[in-house]
Structures are given as C-alpha cells and as structure tokens.
Image (cartoon, grey):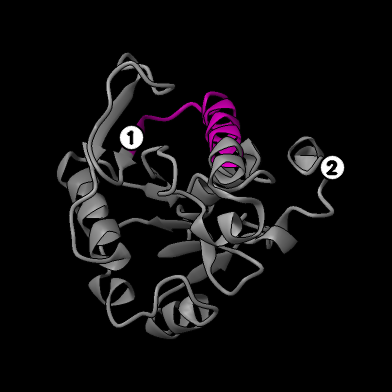
Amino acid sequence: MIFTRNPELGKVKTRLAKSLGDKKALEIYIFLLNRTKEIVEQLSCDIAVFYSEKVRDNDIWENKGYQKYAQEGNDLGERMLNAFDTSFKKGYEKVAIIGSDLYDLEPQHINSAFQQLDNHDAVIGPADDGGYYLLGLKKVIPEIFKNKQWGTSTVRENTLSDLKKHNVFLLSILNDVDIFDDIKDHPAFSQFLN
C-alpha cells in the first residue's frame, strides 16, 4: 500500500515549502512520487494507492495494475488502520504500507519486509526523524494506530512500545523528505536547489 497526497500546489511538503516555496515543494513531491512508482514497479506483489483527497484517474498510477482507494479517517493513524483493514478483508496475508516521500527506498527494503513477516508479527522501516517509512503486518494490531502524535519524533518509539508483546523486525534506517535539511546535501535533489 502506498499512502500518497494528491499533488496540488500548497498542499504537499508544507514544511519543505517554508524553505523553498510551494512551487518547488510540489516539484519535489512529484519527483518523489515518480521515484516511488519506479521502486514499486520492480516488485512482484499487488499494489494499492491510497489517495489523501480523492482517487484520480489518468495520473501516474495508471488504472491498470494499481488498486486505488481514498484514505478514510480523521488522522493518519485512523487512515492507516482502515487501509490495513481493507487489505486484510480482501484476503491478503501480509501487508506493508509505505509513504511517497522516500528517495532512498529500494525494492529490497520492501521485499525484505515481506520475507521477515514470515517469522515476525510486524516489520518497521525506521525513518531517521523518529517516525517510520514502512510498516508491515500479518494482521491488524489496532493499538499501534492510536494515541500517537503523528508527524513527530515520538511515533516510532511509541509504536514499538505498543508492539512490545509482539515479535518485531527493524529494517535499516532511511531518510524521508520532510524539511530542507533532508535534501540540502543529497545529490538527487541538487536540481531543485539552484
């Protein structure tokens, strides 16, 4: 499952926009969306795109090959819980969710998550800002989606605390793109910084 925001000026990468402006933030987000698509197209699994606002036709996620849904819920936790619930109700036995703001994500991170779910209850891809870039589950564990301050550095720690009775595998730490410091020294983003 890919959680994505509809790419609209002034509505994406708002923390990044404080340093670079809305136009550059949107350009960077579209760049990251295309990078995410490039990564997931190398996987051999079903892919569902969950849109923040409404499902779009004729976008980079062509209708053929992608399941498309609108995110439902009042906060990120509720939206993720509902997305997992949707996937498990469709009969999937292992489900992973990623965001769409990770330039450094590689197919092997996602493949490894699915492999580790054979022997673990949950897999987390830790982001270096204290959150996570991937969450893989074999069943819904409702408490991990509740009572979090989403978008803060406490999310991963609190999620791991909720999972202390479960067998959890941690992937390597990656950098998700939220603020200017996340991209200022990354060669892939130099084209946006001139």
Residue 120 seen? no
Q: Quadrant of the C terminus?
A: top right
In front here: 32 or 111? 32
Q: In this view, does 75 lie above or below 41?
A: below
Is 48 inside the magenta-drawn segment? yes
Residue 110 shown in magenta: no
Image spot of residue 154 (x, y percent): 50, 82
Residue 175: image location, x then y, percent: 67, 58
Residue that numbered label 1 is attached to? 48
Q: Residue at x 58, y 74 (%)?
A: 130
Amino acid type, callout 1:
Ala
Figure quadrant of the N terminus: top left
Highlighted range, magenta: 28-49
SS at badge 1: strand
Query: Residue 120 or 16: which is nearer the viewer?
Result: 16
Marks 2 and 1, how far apart at CA: 30 Å
Which residue is identified by label 2?
A: 187
Mark number, residue 181: none
